[in-house]
Image (tube, coloured by chain):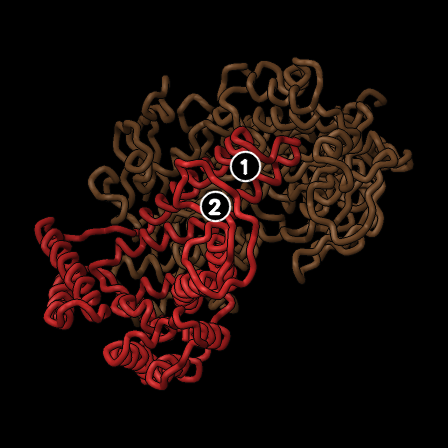
């Protein structure tokens, strides 16, 4: 269906090829998962499928890309709309109209289809994706998962043979991501659509994939069966790593596979427990009482009480719009607060100046790059030292401990996601707050950056700070948090030690916990440590 | 009289607006209108200006140096002066509110649907540009909030830079993403349309529009010679229509659930035309009716014809279908009597 023949691509002004000698064939009807670290050319590869690369991005493409026999170099991008449907990361950014039905019809209007055909296809698509009840809703009022399903529907109405999705679930909470993936699977199984999807959180898609395309980072693409590829892949999901640790062959790709093999492993580990995480009885650094946040008539946070002990990492979880961000902003003091008090070392951060609040509670917002506006890393660091009234060099020193080797002269925009996050974190840490709040920090981080960031978060806590991480990433939360708080409708619905909370709810359980239940193992590292211990004993 | 127009606008908007963001902007137009009136009056007080006999009160006059002769700061304040400022401001504010009412009632994207096919691409560009504005406001708010986190300065040039750069970056990224999405969904496919044909239709449309504008001006302004009015208007319209038809015939694009033109739409447009027509007639009869006199100082008088004209503009409040099912562009046309009537040709 999709064929790459000796394809190389280089962006204008780049020193090396983003894609190099790619030879590739994706047969019809496959679900193909593209993996690789950030910046290795996943988006470039996906864009090349419908000609967006190089027609839209510039740069020079050599070789031939054909889809269903059509050469992307021959036909203009617009004519490919009926062959290849493209769905991006942020659905809202790609919407042209403002209600669901119109959005679904937009692509067909461009093709000049007859009104009856359009009516019929819109109805079919609404049913196929389970969004019929949303038909007249304005797009902006939909939740993230619904928006993403509408975006998929909007390209499906043109009946493309190929669907290309670039990180479709990266902005979604676990349940919404499941909805979107469920819809995709239906397409693959019922319509036989060929689907090419790039995804950081491999664990979500791997089990459904027929083929894996791995980009190791030098511009080449390795294609193969998921189970074979996973043997050596550096972006393996927890089940696969658990399988490697336990020596299973073939490797399990889904929780179900692993669960069926795990009886023996559970027996080996019977009677052993993961090392207990520290209890949450330390004296609280931050104490909030009756915190309420409302926007007009909507109440985002409802009278919440929260104590944050120093030296502990708390994960704040819950679906999109459950009030996580509002709570963090209110705790920091910059956000609005309808009522309630926050007490950090006897001071309410909401009642002091911005500089004062910053020295009490630091916050890294969801779009961290909003904080950066200067041309170079060095300038940002200097500006930060001035703003926080700390000796020159403080911010730079912090940055070096968080992410060593970030070049001084680099433009913040050209940093990798992980480096940029480290820079913002350093800027916020320069004011030496005792409490650090992180809003969705792992969004956009690949597996390795996430691992590194996990140690950073741990260190922040070990230095005595109270750390809160609002996240959708269950694997990250399980690995880093001492305590998990689950929010819904602006209230806390669960609050307790990580192991207890995440194992009691399937939506928030990490893969290892699902495989090992009822034993309370959360991460592969814990299981590995326990296994090597038991070998020593044996 | 102007107040009556304001009331009609307000009423129609209140009855027939939806809950979309642009509909909520009507309040902002009202506020801006109020500010304009206040500014006018304040300026009249501060800078003197129009002379009058009936002195209300006298403020201490600030003597200005020789070179600023002719400008007076403070000094005696006359009723005529204040009223003059008030009427001026009111006139501007009414125009603004009329435009605001149109804006509140008409969904810009539906307006786009009503555009002839030949203008489709221009229309899409305009609508996308329009939708950028609220997004910009959104990102400015977000970035300002983030600035507070850094305890950065909120005012001054440096702060402006701190806000502007992330916002512009955001806007650029978004528009690139949108453009890529639209292109890959087939927007802007030209099909086999030769460039010369496109040039011809474009030229015809623009020429026609110019004619319409000139004609409208002729019709609206009582003092221009008659021959400049209607013939020009009709001629311009004809040229534009020919251009649009030519262009539209070649466009390979279709519409999903087009807005149907039903009795209600006709009624609404008719009431709009009635307002415009009657107003036009009343200016023919006595142009002075519309402007209250300042000397001698009297209460503004109201004559029957213009009142009927304006009141016929309120009819769409009942005639137009309620917004739940459709918010039509037509009531907007009706809600803009006299002052902004040229826009009817657009709607």
Q: Residue B257: x, y in percent?
A: 34, 71
Q: Is residue B82 above or below residue A231?
A: below
Number of numbered discs present? 2
Closer to viewer: mark 1 or mark 2:
2
Residue A9: mark? none
Determine whether the residue tagged by mark 1 lies in a helix, strand or loop.
Answer: loop
Disc 1 designates what residue?
A200
Chain of the residue on which disc 2 is drawn: B
Residue A276 located left or right of residue A205: right
Disc 2 designates what residue?
B136
Q: Is residue B197 above or below residue B95?
A: above
Whether residue B313 can be seen here: yes
Q: Colour of chain A?
A: brown
Within-10-Å neighbours for mark 2: few <14, some 14–19, many 20+: some
Residue B217 found in image quarter? bottom left
Q: Colour of chain B?
A: red
Residue nearer the viewer, A148 or A341: A341
Q: CA distance from mark 1 to mark 2?
A: 29 Å
Residue plotted at (33% across, 47% down):
B184
Residue plotted at (12% across, 54% down):
B203
């Amino acid at each position: 269906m999709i064929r790459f023949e000796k394809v190389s691509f280089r962006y204008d002004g780049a020193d090396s090829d983003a894609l190099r000698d790619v030879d590739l064939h994706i047969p019809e009807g496959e679900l193909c998962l593209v993996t690789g670290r950030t910046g290795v050319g996943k988006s470039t590869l996906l864009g090349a499928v419908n000609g967006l690369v190089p027609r839209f991005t510039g740069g020079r493409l050599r070789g031939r890309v054909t889809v269903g026999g059509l050469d992307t170099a021959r036909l203009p991008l617009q004519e490919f709309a009926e062959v290849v449907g493209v769905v991006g990361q942020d659905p809202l950014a790609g919407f042209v109209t403002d209600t669901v039905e119109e959005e679904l019809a937009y692509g067909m209007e461009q093709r000049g289809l007859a009104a009856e055909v359009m009516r019929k296809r819109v109805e079919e698509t609404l049913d196929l994706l389970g969004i019929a009840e949303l038909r007249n809703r304005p797009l902006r009022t939909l939740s993230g998962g619904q928006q993403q399903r509408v975006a998929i529907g909007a390209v499906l109405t043109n009946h493309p043979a190929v669907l290309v999705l670039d990180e479709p679930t990266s902005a979604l909470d676990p349940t919404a991501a499941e909805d979107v993936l469920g819809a995709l699977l239906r397409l693959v199984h019922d319509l036989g659509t060929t689907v090419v999807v790039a995804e950081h959180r491999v664990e979500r898609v791997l089990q459904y994939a027929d083929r894996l395309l791995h980009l190791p980072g030098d511009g080449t693409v390795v294609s193969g069966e998921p189970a074979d590829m996973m043997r050596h892949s550096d972006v393996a999901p927890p089940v696969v790593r658990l399988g490697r640790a336990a020596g299973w062959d073939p490797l399990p790709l889904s929780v179900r596979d692993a669960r069926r093999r795990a009886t023996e492993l559970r027996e080996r580990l019977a009677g052993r427990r993961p090392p207990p995480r520290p209890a949450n009885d330390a004296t609280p650094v931050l104490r909030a009482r009756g915190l309420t946040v409302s926007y007009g008539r909507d109440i985002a946070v409802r009278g919440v009480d929260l104590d944050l002990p120093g030296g502990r990492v708390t994960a704040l979880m819950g679906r999109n719009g459950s009030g996580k961000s509002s709570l963090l902003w209110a705790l920091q003091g910059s956000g609005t607060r309808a009522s309630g008090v926050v007490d950090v070392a006897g001071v309410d951060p909401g009642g002091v100046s911005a500089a004062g609040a910053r020295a009490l509670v630091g916050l890294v917002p969801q779009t961290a790059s909003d904080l950066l506006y200067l041309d170079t890393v060095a300038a940002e660091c200097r500006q930060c030292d001035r703003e926080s009234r700390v000796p020159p060099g403080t911010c730079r020193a912090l940055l070096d401990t968080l992410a060593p080797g970030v070049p001084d002269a680099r433009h913040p925009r050209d940093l990798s996601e992980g480096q940029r996050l480290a820079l913002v974190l350093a800027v916020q840490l320069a004011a030496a707050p005792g409490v650090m709040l992180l809003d969705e920090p792992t969004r956009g981080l690949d597996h390795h950056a996430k691992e590194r960031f996990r140690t950073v978060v741990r260190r922040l806590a070990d230095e005595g700070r109270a750390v809160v991480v609002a996240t959708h990433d269950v694997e990250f939360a399980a690995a880093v948090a001492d305590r998990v708080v689950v929010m819904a409708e602006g209230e806390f619905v669960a609050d307790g030690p990580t192991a207890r909370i995440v194992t009691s709810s399937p939506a928030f359980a990490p893969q290892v916990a699902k495989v090992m239940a009822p034993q309370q193992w959360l991460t592969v590292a814990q299981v590995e440590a326990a296994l090597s211990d038991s070998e020593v004993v044996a | 009289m102007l107040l009556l127009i304001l009331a009609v606008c307000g009423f129609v908007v209140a009855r027939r607006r939806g809950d979309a963001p642009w509909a909520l902007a009507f309040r902002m137009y009202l506020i801006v209108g109020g500010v304009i009136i206040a500014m006018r009056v304040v300026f009249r007080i501060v800078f003197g200006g129009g002379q009058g006999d009936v002195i209300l009160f006298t403020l201490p006059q600030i003597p200005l140096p020789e070179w600023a002769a002719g400008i007076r700061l403070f000094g005696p304040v006359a009723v005529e002066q204040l009223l003059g400022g008030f009427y001026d401001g009111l006139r501007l504010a009414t125009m603004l509110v009329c435009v605001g009412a149109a804006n509140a009632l008409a969904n810009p994207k539906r307006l786009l649907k009503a555009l002839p096919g030949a203008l489709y691409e221009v229309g899409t560009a305009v609508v996308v540009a329009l939708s950028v504005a609220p997004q910009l406001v959104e990102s400015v708010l977000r970035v300002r909030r983030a600035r507070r986190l850094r305890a950065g300065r909120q005012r001054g040039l440096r702060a402006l830079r701190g806000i502007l750069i992330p916002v512009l970056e955001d806007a650029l990224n978004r528009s690139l993403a949108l453009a890529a999405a639209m292109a890959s969904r087939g927007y802007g496919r030209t099909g086999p349309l030769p460039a010369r044909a496109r040039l011809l239709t474009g030229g015809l449309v623009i020429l026609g529009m110019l004619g319409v504008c000139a004609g409208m001006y002729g019709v609206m302004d009582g003092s221009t010679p008659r021959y400049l009015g209607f013939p020009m208007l009709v001629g311009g319209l004809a040229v534009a229509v020919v251009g649009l038809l030519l262009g539209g015939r070649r466009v390979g694009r279709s519409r999903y659930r087009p807005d149907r033109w039903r009795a209600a739409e006709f009624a609404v447009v008719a009431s709009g035309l009635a307002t415009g027509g009657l107003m036009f007639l009343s200016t023919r009869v006595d142009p002075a009716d519309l402007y209250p006199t300042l000397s001698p100082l009297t209460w503004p008088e109201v004559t029957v014809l213009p009142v009927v004209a304006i009141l016929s503009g309120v009819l769409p409040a009942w005639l137009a279908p309620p917004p739940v099912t459709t918010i039509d562009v037509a009531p907007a046309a009706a809600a803009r009597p006299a002052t902004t009537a040229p826009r009817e040709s657009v709607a």
